[in-house]
Image: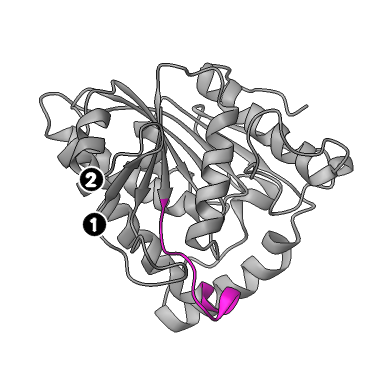
Amino acid sequence: MTYLLYLREPGRKTGGPVTSGYLENIADGTSGRPAEDSLARASSIIFLFHGFNVDRDEGKVSLQGTASHLISHPDAAIVGVLWPGDHWVGFLSYPFEGGTADDSALELVRFIERVVQRGANLSFVTHSLGTRVALEAIDRLSLINDVSAVPYELSRACLMAAAVNDFSLSEDERYDSAVESCERVAVLSSKRDRVLRFAYPAGNLLHSFLHWDREAGFALGYGGPKKLPPNAVSHKPIPKGRKSRHGHYLPDFPLGGGDMNERSDKNRVSAAEYADEFLKGSSNPDYD
């Protein structure tokens, strides 16, 4: 069953503040409390995250399309997380969206605490800056687990084209505790990703200057982990011959759709199948 969780104003297409979670059940059209009651019965949940500069409508299409490709998990609830990592100025807002990602993570955790049953198995599939939302949320959930009699089961996190620093998963770095709290983490990267190759370092440098942040670095989703990650982390670099760009990860079409003669559609399906196999239990799935 697929749900959409709005951490943005449902009636607003672009930008706006981070809001408390509002849930919609795509299967039966219910929303609010009835949808929450349905999700509360789920013992296994997969959270999907779109990236930066994705408006509400684009996010709905890509998250629902991706959900339809996760065919190995018929008993899991799939929750697409719509967060306001966009602005009317477009990509120029990037240096300011890190705070939005962190605020979105906080509201996601508040929603999980309020709605999701303790002991539920939680997995995560992310794209671009949505990776920061997920890792911040996992980090907070791990702290909750430390003092909970019945902790959430933080299972697997599949990080695709991750717009976080390439050293951030390593020991004594920003998200090492998030990695340690998960059963396993997979990183899917592409050196054909021009956004992460050129725009990410420039935007990250500006962000560091504006916010006095010393964590400037290169993108995890471009070349993979810079430092040797924990054993629980696997890294799959996409072959350069596939020419996988930054937008070639989340299918914006349902299972069986798309034009497989288009490189972009083929790459999106391969990324979704990679995530599907990883969530199913593969330690290092192929990218075919």
SS of the residue under disc 2: loop
Instruction: Verify CB contact (< 8 Å) between mark 1 and mark 2.
Output: no
Nearest to the observer: residue 30 or residue 50: 30
SS of the residue under disc 1: loop
Nearest to the observer: residue 23 or residue 46: 23
Q: Does the magenta stretch include residue 152?
A: no
Disc 2 designates what residue?
A: 32
Among the 4 quarters of the image, the one containing residue 143: top left
Vertical arrangement, residue 250 with respect to residue 272, above or below: below
* Residue 165 visible, this angle: no
User: What amino acid type is highlighted by mark number 2?
Assistant: Gly
Mark toward the viewer: 1 or 2: 2
Disc 1 designates what residue?
A: 20
Nearest to the observer: residue 229 or residue 23: 23
Q: Is residue 92 magenta?
A: yes
Among the 4 quarters of the image, the one containing residue 144: top left
Vertical arrangement, residue 128 with respect to residue 40, above or below: below
Q: Where is residue 253 in the image (x, y as percent from the top left)?
A: 65, 40
Quadrant including the N terminus: top left
Q: Where is residue 5 in the image (x, y as percent from the top left)?
A: 35, 47
Total of numbered circles in the picture?
2
Q: Earlier in the sequence, mark 1 or mark 2?
A: 1
User: Is residue 103 rendered to the left or right of residue 195?
Assistant: left
Residue positioned 19% across, 32% down in the render: 37
Residue positioned 14% across, 23% down in the render: 150
* Residue 84 visible, this angle: yes
Residue positioned 64% across, 74% down in the render: 202
- Which stretch did the figure color magenta? 82-94
Check residue 53 in the rendering and tell me which mark sits there, or answer none.
Answer: none
